[in-house]
Amino acid sequence: MPASHPAIQKARWYDCSVKVTIAFADDELYRRVKVQAAASGRQVRDIVEEALAAWLERAEETEDVAASMEALVEYGSAGGIDASRFFDRMVNEGRVSYEPD
């Protein structure tokens, strides 16, 4: 197909939906999903989209936590301290005062 073909023009992520065929290896899983989708008045594709979005969110959170931990290790290696220790030291040195509520 030439690049100007209408099907190629439409297949942009930002202006169309993408169709995917999923072949469930577990027929029982598919039946259970279908029953739950019907019981909630939703389509299987909605359930699959929701599950994939949740899966991606968890993956991104896991990456964020790993990156944060790496940053903390690097910060500690460079002589950094956590905020509570920093503020305790500032109070003890008389640089700041702390008054409870």
Image (cartoon, rainbow, N blue to C red):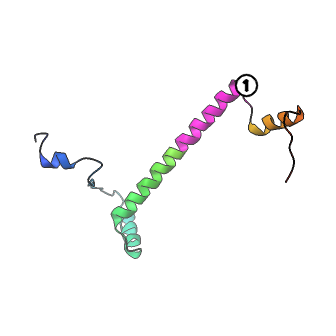
Look at label 1 and name its amino acid: Gly
Is 4 on the left-hand or right-hand side of 38? left
In the rendered view of the protein, which quadrant contains the C terminus? Answer: bottom right
Percent position of residue 90, x then y:
83, 34
Rendered image quadrant of residue 4:
top left
What is the quadrant of the N terminus in the image?
top left
Quadrant of the image occupied by residue 83: top right
Does the rendering let one see residue 27? no
Residue 48: image quadrant is bottom left
Above or below, 72 relative to 10: above
Q: Residue at x 41, y 54 (%)?
A: 52
Residue drawn at point x = 72 percent, y = 29 percent = 80
**Residue 55, x across and y down, in percent:** 46, 52
Residue at position x 42%, y 59% from top?
Answer: 50
Residue, x 35% and y 65% (percent of image)? 44
Q: Is residue 31 left or right of residue 68?
A: left
| Residue 63 included in the magenta stretch of the image | yes
The answer, for residue 91, to whether it is visible in the render is yes
Per the image, label 1 sits on a secondary structure element best described as loop
**Position in image of residue 8 (x %, y %):** 17, 45
Q: Give the residues drawn in magenta, as a range.
A: 62-81
Compare residues 22 and 100 and report the one nearer the observer: 100
Judging depth in this view, the residue of 22 and 89 nearest the camera is 89
Seen from the viewer's position, the closer of residues 23 and 44 is 44
**Magenta stretch encompasses residue 66:** yes
* Residue 61, placed above or below residue 19: above
Identify the residue at the far top of this view.
Answer: 78
Residue 79 appears at what percent x and percent y? 73, 25
Residue under numbered circle 1: 79
Residue 33 to residue 96: above or below:
below
Q: Residues within 10 Å of mark 1 (few under 14, many from 20)?
A: few
Overall secondary structure of the magenta stretch? helix
